[in-house]
Image (cartoon, rainbow, N blue to C red):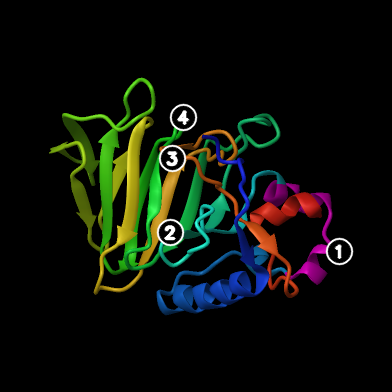
Amino acid sequence: MKGSERGDSTMKRSEVNELIRDAIAFFDRHQFKLPPFAYWTPQDWKGIGEEAAEIRDNMLGWDITDFGSDQFKKTGLFLFTLRNGNPSEKQKYPKTYAEKIMIVREEQITPYHFHWQKMEDIINRGGGNLILRLYPSTEDGRLGDGEMAVHLDGVTRTIMAGDTVKLQPGESITLLPYQYHSFWAEKGNGPVLTGEVSHVNDDNQDNRFLDPLQRFSDIEEDETPLHYLVSDYTKL
């Protein structure tokens, strides 16, 4: 299941705007500073041209999804892509790496998925504890079994398929291609400021979800956007 497939689920723009306001306050509390384009308004974008093509073409910026669940607080993820290359335009955008910052809420599930190409480090940058459940993929794309090696801050551990790994603030894990993962913030310890450092990120072609879902939520425009989402760039 590729990242660009969509269903009938929608999020209200008013909900998205409120989540962005909450996120900015959360980032400020953790002294994590966003780049200037994070704060561009729709009015600002009207005066911006090809000088910002990298932002649009490489989907940098705000990214909020409920994965088609209609229950963002239970199944969803808040992301901001800080930097990224572009596998379709390698000469124009030669970066081979990407970085995201995410907010993972208590018991808010990011569904099982793996990446065919991307290797990524998931990093607990602060807040509560991040829990990941891991499986290898079978040849037909289902959950595998048996032992699997995981790499935690330079230390290799062996776990069983379906085991969980807890990342406390400052800890990280390396996720390899074809390695299914789902994650959430542990109950009782608050949301997690979660970093991702990876190979180039392609959310349209390089996500394999275990169960059919939509990577980008459709938006019901019940008010004016505070800031555009990466999925809004096609409208510019």
Residue 123 in view (yes/no): yes
Within-10-Å neighbours for mark 1: few <14, some 14–19, many 20+: few
Name the element at disc 1. loop
Is residue 212 left or right of 40 when viewed as pictured? left
Q: Mark 3 points at which residue?
A: 211
Q: What residue type is labelled 2?
A: Thr
Q: Residue at point 67% right, 69% down?
A: 13
Q: Is residue 26 toward the left or the right of residue 176 in the image? A: right
Cα separation, mark 2 vs mark 4, equals 24 Å
- Within 10 angstroms of label 4, few (less than 14), some, or many (20 or more) residues? some
Identify the mark nearer the N-term, 1 or 2: 1
Residue on which disc 2 sits: 75
Q: Where is residue 46 in the image (x, y as percent from the top left)?
A: 85, 64
- 82 is higher (above) or lower (below) than 128: above
Is there CB contact under 8 Å for labels 2 and 3? no
Q: Earlier in the sequence, mark 1 or mark 3?
A: 1
Q: Is residue 65 left or right of residue 59?
A: left
Q: Nearer the viewer, mark 1 or mark 2?
A: 2
In this view, which residue lies farthest toward the front? Answer: 8
Residue 47 image label: 1
Residue 120 sits above or below residue 138 on the image? below
Specify start and end residues of the magenta stretch as a single range.
41-56
Where's residue 236, x and y in %? 81, 55
